[in-house]
Image (cartoon, helix red, strand yellow):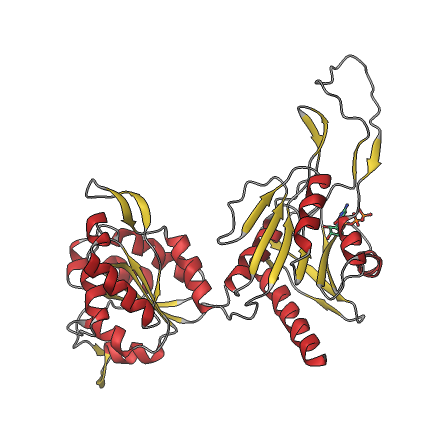
Amino acid sequence: MKLIENKNILLGVCGGIAAYKSVELLRLLKRHGANVKVFMTENSEAFVGRLTFEALSGQPVCSSLFEKVGSRSEHIGHIDWAEKADALVIAPATANIIGKIANGIADDALSTLVLAVTSPVIICPSMNTNMYRNRALQRNLDRLRQDGLFVIEPESGELACGTSGPGRLPEPEYILDRLLFRLSPKDLKDKNILVTAGPTQEYIDPVRFLSNPSSGKMGYSIARAAEKRGGRVVLVTGPTSLSDPLNATVIRVGSAEDMAIAVFEHMEHADIIIKAAAVSDYRPVDPCQQKIKKEKDEIVLSLQKNQDILEELGRRKENRLLVGFAAETENLEKNSVDKLVRKNLDIIVGNLVGRPSSGFGSDSNKVTFFYKDGTTESFPEMGKDEVADILLDRIVTMVRYRLSDN
Ligand code: CTP
């Protein structure tokens, strides 16, 4: 994840049961290439030992106002790190630290750090439900939001103290996701983005269908990346096992015909349409109403062509930006460019499918972008999240270019 790779992320840990989740958050941040420095409050050391954080971050933990950096006695630890920080995440954030931050109190290393940082600050409250609902606490959280800090709402559920309700620290993956949201440029703000993903299923009888191995990962990566960049996302998806992207309108469909209906219904408001779905080209002419019995040694399936949704979008395109995908097993360039022209696209993302490290089902992809002006861009194998971000970079550039052209 380029956004936090080699970036200085400060992780503040307060005294709460959820402090054990900070360990996992630290590991996630490290796995994505961040340099992490942990700041612990005195109370947090009752929950997790500093050695754990030191071993996983590879840095001494800062918990004292008077910690010096190495042998340079002129540098005070929290100030030095505050200047270098790209983001500060406090997880879990107790009522105590929230109250201190809201009122500008700086009486330990973490609260002093908060006053000194100029980077984005992300607060993850976690506490007993009644404490969370307390008016003073809510007033303090409002103050934090007004001051420009980013508050991640706690989850509802059973809490360690035996009560049930809001107050639980969200899972580390969610906190990381919202950190990336906070750090992402909002270059798709106010844009409506329609994305399709996954396979379609064409039923032969009530228990069997024709489909393909698309996992939906590419389209979901695009939907998640577009949301982080401020876009309003509608995701039309065939059957997948993936969880819904945050803050997107998700429409689940089965067949190519269902997908076409959903896409045409939502295309009106779309500024950008990205069709990553692997749509079945054919459907059975006459699906059986009952399960087909294996009486004959050989049966013949009669298929008819599905509508090409993207080609129809190309006809109705007007000033929308239209992006397609080409799944090929050979002649990548020729086949992709043919589709780019035939479907009236701005970009087609060509990828070779049918190999383990690229295309269907895989977490990575090796793609070439073909643009309508005849230029191309080839990329090495990379994660689908990264492909999604680069594709959106190019789309943003095209949208800007068009605006400056008009
Ligand atoms: N597509 C579509 N509707 C279809 C078939 C494809 O919208 N009925 C879209 C896909 O979502 C993709 C692009 O068209 O963005 C290319 O899909 P692909 O399967 O690679 O190519 P096809 O056009 O189906 O051509 P062929 O199967 O002959 O390669």
> In this orientation, which residue lies closer to the viewer: 47 or 281?
281
Q: Quadrant of residue 117?
A: bottom left
In the rendered view, does 200 fall on the left or right side of 76?
Answer: right
Q: Is residue 33 visible?
A: no
Going by the picture, which residue comes out furthest to the bottom?
Answer: 74
In the rendered view, does 151 fall on the left or right side of 234?
Answer: left
Residue plotted at (21% across, 41% down):
163
Residue plotted at (77% across, 62% down):
345
285 to 294, vertically: above or below = below
Residue plotted at (60% across, 54% down):
364
In the rendered view, does 366 fall on the left or right side of 374?
Answer: left
> In this orientation, which residue lies closer to the viewer: 353 or 153?
153
Q: Where does the image place residue 186, in percent across and percent down from the top left?
A: 52, 69
Q: Is residue 374 visible?
A: yes
Q: Where does the image place residue 127, in percent across and percent down from the top left?
A: 23, 52
Q: Where does the image place residue 50, in percent across and percent down from the top left?
A: 22, 60
Q: Where does the image place residue 29, in percent across and percent down from the top left?
A: 40, 61
In the rendered view, does 181 fall on the left or right side of 136?
Answer: right
20 to 75, vertically: above or below = above
210 to 364, vertically: above or below = above
How many marks are shown on the rendered structure? 0
